[in-house]
Amino acid sequence: MEKPAVFRVPEAIFYGRGSSEKVGAEAALRGKNALIISDKIMDQLGYVSECRIYLQEAGVKSEIYLGVASEPTDEYVAEALELFQKQQCDLVISVGGGSCIDTAKAIAVLATNGGYIGEYMGGKKLAQNAPVPHIAIPTTAGTGSEATDVTVITNSSNDVKMMIKQPAFMPSVAIVDPLLTLSSPKNVTSATGVDALSHAVEAYLSKKAHPMTDTIAISAMKLIVENILTAYNEGDNVDAREAMSLGSLQAGMAFSNASVCLVHGMSRPIGALFHVPHGISNAMLLPAVLEFSQEACVDRLADIGRIFQPDNESLTNEEAAEVAVQSVKELCRKLNIPNLRGWGIDEEAFTNAVGKMAHDAVDSGSPGNNPRVPAKSELEELYHVCYDYQFSSETEKV
């Protein structure tokens, strides 16, 4: 390593079946009046009321904000912050997927530092004051946001997904209860699972990777590769769900400290302009981006290929790298991941947006961490490749 590396995680991580019961005790250590950031689906499933019961038993009052209805926007942040201040809350609890967690991260920082969330993008404004405590409780095995110092908020005025990374956005506590993921439908399980895989893969391929991130990225990939199809096909398999939750958590820790690369750089503009959920857009792009990057990271891709075929000891690095790419493609096919056309994105609208998407992707900085850094023209070409990308050798569309 050319310079000292850093490894940041929440001050406490609770993991395992039933760990969500810890939210009351942990909240009581940090505040007296919590704002729960969630959505209507989590409320209907009973997760929000369950959280409130645990808080009440611990002597902590709670208010709820259920306005997160899509990928997080600056409008959600403004609404939730207003409620936080009006109800004089002193800590935040997020219950849900990455959208709920990312919204809560923004509230935790703005509550003590003020300003507009977009001002924190690119380090233009730094959080000088400690954020209010934030307890993150994920209900999907995908984003890993419970263990990252990154939040992604869409600027509703220009349709740009603002990737904001500062230590202040790291949750105080992560509570990862795999039982909460049992309610995830198949399409969410597949999309968030490949999202988690992309986090681990990009953390391992990133130019900013270091030994600590390598160790947990490899562990995450093994857990995900060995369990994602079981979790997808057998949604009530708690062992598979538990392994996926751990893999997602580890992948989050890995990419938060090593950074993401080209997949995420390309994914955010797609989500912002065409309202494709983050997890599925990452999954759509991962195989094509690996093919694009393959020659620049043969040895590292070979390590990933050997995770897919651990018993094939005769593979050269070039062969194992090809195994990695083809195995990810096959995995996406088995998980019924669509390409961009298959998702329903209009071809003309997509073509017209390619220039802006390539510009926004480069502007995010993430492609610069990729083993092969694309020029803007190469990015535009890669977007076109991804639009009709085939996850199998068959001629029909996915």
Image: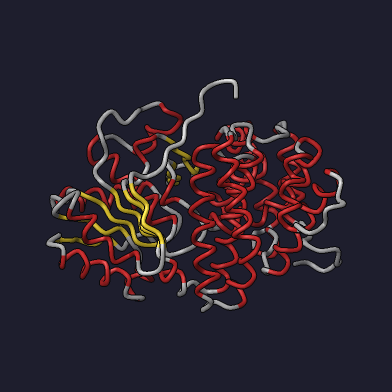
Q: Residue at x 18, y 61 (%)?
A: 62
> 173 above or below 343?
above
Image quarter where the C terminus lies is bottom right
Along the line of sight, the residue nearer the viewer: 324 or 52: 324
Along the line of sight, the residue nearer the viewer: 334 or 155: 334
Horizontal and vertical percent position of residue 7 = 46, 36
Horizontal and vertical percent position of residue 237 = 53, 77
Q: Residue at x 79, y 56 (%)?
A: 326
> 173 above or below 24?
above
> 208 above or below 78?
above
> Is residue 275 visible in the rendered structure shown here?
no
Image quarter where the N terminus lies is top right
Question: How does the figure colour the protein chain or chains?
Answer: secondary structure
Horizontal and vertical percent position of residue 338 = 68, 64
Q: Residue at x 48, y 40 (%)?
A: 163
> 212 above or below 124?
below
Q: Residue at x 31, y 31 (%)?
A: 127
Left or right: residue 36 versus residue 233 is left
> Is residue 264 visible in the rendered structure shown here?
yes
Along the line of sight, the residue nearer the viewer: 261 or 152: 261
Q: How many marks?
A: 0
